[in-house]
Image (spheres, grey):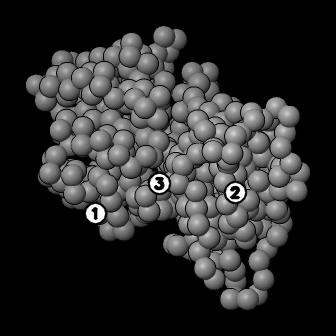
Amino acid sequence: MAMPSLPLAPPFRLRARVLTPLAAGGTRYFADGAVHVDPHGRISRVADWAEASEPEASEPEVDAMTRIRDYDVRPWLVLPGLVDLHTHIPQLPNAGVGAGLDLLTWLEQYTFPLERRFDAAAAERLGPLAMRAFSAAGTTTVAAYASADPDATEVLLQSAEAHGIRAVIGLVLMGRTVGDEHGGAASPDEDAGLRASAELAARWHGRDEGRLRYAFTPRFALSCSGQVLRASARLAAETGSYWQTHLSEDPRELDEVRRAFPEARDYLDVYDRAGALGPGGPSALFAHAIHLSDREIERLAESGAGVAHCPASNLFLPSGIMPLARYLEAGIPVGLGSDISGGPGPSIFEVMRVGAYAQHALQIVGGDPRPVLDPLGWLRLGTLGGAAALGLADTIGSLEPGREADMIAIDASLTEPLPGAGSADEPAEIVSRLIFRTHPQMVRGAWVRGRLLPA
Ligand SMILES: [Zn+2]
């Protein structure tokens, strides 16, 4: 079959199978649908094609010179773009190796050596490829850690700017190692990192009308002094930037945190004492958050901070299974993260699959009676869930009028059980196969604000 041609830039009307979670709850599916994208890259209409091909009174008159072009990509499926809430760009070359190690050993053996070499030249080579790898997997928004090198971080932000993906990126703040004293002053490395972070935030946070954003990024409690945690949280709040870190990933890590921060009630309290949870705190994003006490769950829910759930990473490194249903019940904003290279690849569909298996295991072995998400629930988590955790639930995450046109086109026939066996035509079945029979080439196009991302 010939590949349908894809719109490069707005405005346009896309004819496709259209499936989207709705912000108000539920899902909409059009077997023959239309998405109208206006000249500013916003969705102006989503409807049945037959109905949508009639001009609507509320739509602006378009003269012959700027006639909006129609693109027919049927039988491809159009979904909102996926949100990857947590990943490490410098670690892409390690993706798929290191399974089974505990977190702290894995960091020492695989991660720190790779990240220490990640300078501006390495970022020039890897940055453009990394952005394409994310969008080829269906990710249109990525929240990522760079390395501890300010120039490399600058280059990665430039790569995201040039590629067109929506991105939140931060310079990794770290200066301490396991076994150091943690309570007190910042190390010289941390001081330099804080200054560089403030400069990067001033240059990048909010660039291109908010497509690019900055995150102050203290790696995790054990690599930071108390002072750098406090100063980064304050700077993030002052500049309106995000503040991202790791929380409660691995049992040995938890023991070390207890030893290093004896004054804290629990792991979350280390960050709370640093001012990262408000009131008056920054928009905080915590990766993993697996082994939380009842108190931590309550405090997290109260604070409104987001959690990046990274199940593929949490079983690749044997860290644990996050009690997802419990957090959702508590009202914590949860999205999904690939956590490369703790996780083996960028596909959020694959993250959904491992997440579903892990939650089934929690039900069987852990005796958790709460229901596990169905496929449409996982799709919601990977789109609107991630958007909400970033405070962008009104801007992206679903295909609804007024939102920015961040979306993907998928050839779902690649997920059929056998060639020619027939496509599913019921939304839950379609999404179930995208998750459980993910094909590496199934994402055929990805747009941010209606601009096609380079594949
Ligand atoms: Zn991580």
Q: Quadrant of the N terminus?
A: bottom right
Earlier sequence position, callout 1 versus callout 2: 2
How far from the left and from the top, in percent, is residue 239? Answer: 38, 16
Earlier sequence position, callout 3 versus callout 2: 2
Q: Image point 83% across, 43% down: which residue?
A: 55
- Nearest the viewer among 406 and 20 is 406
- Nearest the viewer among 68 and 422 is 68
Position of residue 391 relative to residue 385, above or below, is: above
Q: Image point 46% across, 35% down: which residue?
A: 211
Circle 1 — which element?
helix
- Where is mark 1, residue-wise? 93
- Where is mark 3, residue-wise? 453
Circle 2 — which element?
strand
In space, the residues marked 3 and 2 are separated at their CA atoms by: 19 Å
How far from the left and from the top, in percent, is residue 254? Answer: 39, 40
Circle 3 — which element?
loop
- Where is mark 2, residue-wise? 70
In space, the residues marked 3 and 1 are separated at their CA atoms by: 22 Å
Q: Image point 59% across, 24% down: which residue?
A: 304
